[in-house]
């Protein structure tokens, strides 16, 4: 398994270091950093702070993904999943959450709210052309295979 060093800056004394919860977990859990509980009504969205900032090396990105337990048990997930943390961003990581459930969901400080994956990034070199090569699919999309 490949490793990469990511520096973590604690912005609040109650912030928690992201952590892998199992030996082979792909993502590290991100934890809410809150002074008081934060309620999220059904159909609404909010920004949940983590109290940390990171320095991701060039050539990598941070992908923020939902936690399956929050989604299945409460209908709470990320609005922009996966979210991207660019390698040149140094501000606090905040998670855009949405409540698709039927009940108000209340976040507590120290609660695991999302996962962070550090993944390699490729930069594309774009070339304008007048024709594209043909494939068996061509322009078929949005359910074209049945």
Image (spheres, grey):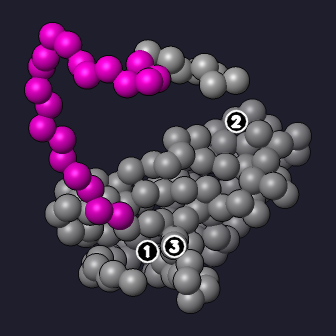
Q: Residue at x 14, y 31 (%)?
A: 126
Q: Is residue 88 visible?
A: yes
Q: What whole-number distance in Å separates the C-alpha atoms at marks 3 and 2?
A: 29 Å
| Location of mark 1 (residue) | 12
Identify which residue is drawn at 88% across, 40% down: 102
**Residue 122's spot in the image, x, y percent?**
23, 52
What span is colored magenta in the figure?
119-138
Which mark is first along the chain, 1 or 2?
1
To which residue does mark 2 refer?
Answer: 44
Describe the element under mark 1 as helix, strand or loop: loop
The quarter of the displayed image where residue 127 is located = top left
Are there few (<14), some (14-19), or many (20+) residues within 10 Å of tag 3? Answer: some
Q: Which one is nearer the viewer's eye here, 98 or 132?
A: 132
Any magenta on residue 137?
yes
Q: Nearer the viewer, mark 2 or mark 1?
A: 2
Q: Which residue is mark 3?
A: 26
């Amino acid at each position: 398994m490949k490793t990469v060093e990511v520096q973590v800056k604690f912005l609040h004394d109650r912030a928690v270091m992201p952590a892998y919860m199992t030996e082979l977990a792909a993502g590290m859990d991100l934890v809410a950093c809150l002074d008081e509980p934060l309620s999220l009504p059904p159909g609404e969205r909010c920004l949940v702070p983590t109290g940390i900032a990171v320095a991701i090396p060039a050539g990598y990105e941070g992908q923020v993904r939902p936690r399956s337990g929050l989604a299945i048990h409460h209908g709470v997930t990320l609005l922009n999943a996966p979210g991207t943390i660019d390698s040149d961003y140094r501000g606090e990581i905040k998670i855009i959450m949405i409540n698709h459930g039927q009940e108000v969901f209340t976040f507590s400080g120290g609660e695991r709210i999302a996962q962070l994956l550090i993944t390699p990034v490729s930069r594309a070199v774009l070339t304008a052309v007048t024709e594209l090569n043909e494939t068996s699919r061509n322009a078929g999309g949005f359910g074209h295979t049945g």
